[in-house]
Amino acid sequence: MTNIIQVVWEWSGFTGAPGYTNLFFDAAGGTQTDALAAVTKSQIFFSGLTPNLPDDVHIAPQTDVRVINDIDGKLVDIFTVIGVAGVQGGQPGNYAAPVGAIVFWPTTTVHGGRRMTGRTFIVPASAAAFQDDGTLNTAAGTTINQAAEDMRTASGPAFGVWGRPKFSKPATVPPTVVENGKWGPATSSRVPDKCVVLTSRRD
């Protein structure tokens, strides 16, 4: 079992908002200090994205930071974290609200019979981030991947991927876990040279 910290950043300022990005970190001691360190580390990622975000997009951390059990997803603790600033996109001009880029987070952790790989949507991205053929331009891909690696390798709680538990269907009370959840550290990051469309704002 590993207790993990769930950090949620809220996207706002565009059609279709709000959107949410969930990031998961090793809870270490599971203290207020660890929660603050996780939020501070996650800010590195979002700060690095700003050159490729429309200038009306704002992304800010939610103040409630949860510590959860990775096996069953139950809440272990919750901390209020303040003082970590949000970020604002830096590119003017038109853009498509549901269109952007994606970061994949490979791990060496096996869950559900396969090696876990997480994903984080960067949506919306500015029109300037794309080439005429609709794929990411080289500079944007490099900048986004650098932001991902800067966060992943920064000091502080380890960043990783959570494979959520699976529960029995039909549901039982209390819920019956049929496959335990598992968290594993991200070993790298990858930004594919393509455009993605986000249909749900909860990813």
Image (cartoon, grey):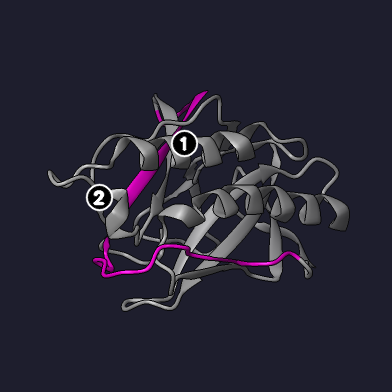
Report x, y in % for residue 110: 48, 24
> In this figure, which residue is indicated by the disc labeled 1?
145
Location of residue 131 by image quarter: top left
Which amino acid, by three-letter code, is at mark 2? Answer: Val
Q: Which residue is drawn at 34% across and 62% down?
A: 124
Q: Which mark is residue 102?
A: none
Quarter of the figure that contains the C terminus: bottom left
Q: Which of 67 and 95 is in front in this view?
A: 95
In magenta stretch: residue 93: yes
Boundaries of the magenta span: 84-112
> In this figure, which residue is indicated by the disc labeled 2?
196
Report x, y in % for residue 18: 43, 75
Is residue 185 shown to the viewer in this render? yes
- Would residue 65 appear left or right of 138 to someone viewing this image? right
Tell me which numbered mark, 2 or 1, is placed earlier along the sequence.
1
| Mark 1 element type | helix
Q: Which of 23 and 136 is in front in this view?
A: 136
Instruction: Please rate how many residues cluster around mark 2, counting C-alpha atoms within 10 Å: few if below 14, some from 14 to 19, many from 20.
Output: many
